[in-house]
Image (cartoon, rainbow, N blue to C red):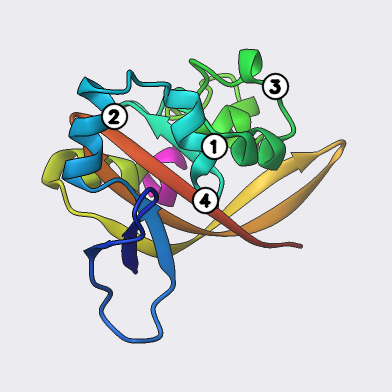
Amino acid sequence: MKTICSFFNSVISEGTSPDDRASHGVCNSCYSKIMTEHGFNLQKFLNLLDAPVFLVDKDVNVLAANTLAFAAVSKPIDKIKGQLCGDLLECVNAFLPAGCGKTPSCPDCTIRNSVNETYRTGTQITRRPADVTRKNGDAEETAHLLISTRKDNGIVLLQLEFLAVA
């Protein structure tokens, strides 16, 4: 995936093929300027991004999210911060007594593994397919997603692309 600076449309990193989709971020120059000259409003920055994005810690707790992420999980900001991704996505495992991240199925969670891999190695993950079985009332449904991660200053930006729900 090609990464483009949200402020100046300059290419931060090239994709692996000409057909790669573009993701948005902030180049080092803009990042420095935002932090030192303009003050920083994290929420405004996240809202510039064109996909549901969560900032998560190493345990996949949500630290912040953009408005597209709020809409994707149908929850307001005060119900998102500090929550685990599995809780927000209403993963069936999050409803088990052990909870998100602690059930026998959690070691196979693509979202958790992608975030942990990026934290551990610093490697950016681009559009990794993931299926999440979610509660939908009394029924279950499968959400088909693409997961992208990127580490910046000890925090992972987790982007979710919702493909379909079956």
Q: Secondary structure at mark 4?
A: strand
- Pick whichever of labels 1 and 2 is earlier in the sequence: 2
Are the two marked residues, 1 and 2, in contact with CB atoms closer than 8 angstroms? no
* Residue 13 versus residue 8 in the image, above or below: below
The CA distance from mark 4 to mark 1 is 14 Å
Q: Which residues are magenta?
A: 104-111
Q: As shown in the figure, which amino acid type bears the numbered disc 3?
A: Pro
Q: Which mark is residue 92?
A: none
- Pick whichever of labels 3 and 4 is earlier in the sequence: 3
The CA distance from mark 2 to mark 4 is 25 Å
- Pick whichever of labels 2 and 4 is earlier in the sequence: 2
The CA distance from mark 3 to mark 1 is 14 Å
Tell me, yes or no, if residue 91 can be seen here. Answer: no
Q: As shown in the figure, which amino acid type bears the numbered disc 4?
A: Leu
Q: Is residue 79 left or right of residue 157?
A: right
Residue at point 65%, 32% (across, down): 70
Q: Position of residue 139 (x, y in %)?
A: 84, 44
Residue at point 22%, 32% (across, down): 33
The front one of 57 and 97 is 57
Furthest residue in direction front, as rendered: 37
Circle 2 residue: 34
Q: Position of residue 122 (x, y in %)?
A: 15, 46
